[in-house]
Image (spheres, rainbow, N blue to C red):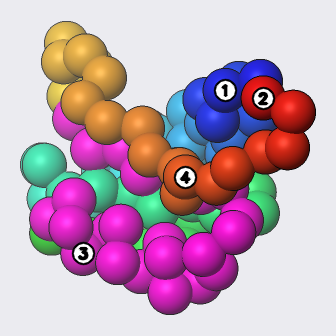
Amino acid sequence: MTLTQHPENKKNQEVFERLLPQLRASCPHGFYALIAQGDLKGTFRSYGEALEKGYAISETDVFFVKQIESPSEGIHCISTPFQTVAGE
């Protein structure tokens, strides 16, 4: 299983999609959302800031970082921490 297929990452992505209209209305264009454990953990000016906070929350838990964009823009980034899984 790849990290983007991890069930927790799917849950985090679903939370992002649900919150997206609210995020678009309340955050400046181009900010990044960090979602972990099914909760919005914050919005950040840069991808690097969001990643840093994600790793600070936990180096082993799956987390999701995505840029908040207008409806016409595509996916810019999805990130989870890398970890080795035995047998893969």
- Disc 2 marks which amino acid? Glu
**Residue annotated with mark 4:** 82
Local packing at callout 3 (Cα closer than 10 Å; few below 14, some 14-19, many 20+) is few
Q: Nearer the viewer, mark 2 or mark 4?
A: 2
**Residue annotated with mark 1:** 2
From mark 1 to mark 3, how far is it between C-alphas? 24 Å
Q: Is residue 83 above or below residue 49?
A: above
Callout 4 touching callout 3 (CB < 8 Å): no
From mark 2 to mark 3, how far is it between C-alphas? 30 Å
- Disc 1 marks which amino acid? Thr
Q: Secondary structure at mark 2?
A: loop
Residue 50 on the magenta segment: yes
From mark 4 to mark 1, how far is it between C-alphas? 10 Å
Local packing at callout 1 (Cα closer than 10 Å; few below 14, some 14-19, many 20+) is few
Where is residue 41? Give x, y as percent: 55, 74
Instruction: Compare marks 2 and 3 and give the one earlier in the sequence.
Output: 3
**Quadrant in the rendering for residue 72:** top left
**Residue annotated with mark 2:** 88
The image quadrant where one finds the C terminus is top right
- Label drawn at residue 49: 3
- Which residue range is magenta in the image? 46-69
Q: Secondary structure at mark 1?
A: loop
- Disc 3 marks which amino acid? Glu
Where is residue 51? Give x, y as percent: 36, 67
Where is residue 68? Give x, y as percent: 28, 43
- Label drawn at residue 86: none
Q: Nearer the viewer, mark 2 or mark 3?
A: 2
From mark 1 to mark 2, how far is it between C-alphas? 9 Å
Residue 6 can be seen in this image: yes
Instruction: Compare marks 4 and 1 and give the one earlier in the sequence.
Output: 1
The image quadrant where one finds the N terminus is top right
Instruction: Compare marks 1 and 3 and give the one earlier in the sequence.
Output: 1
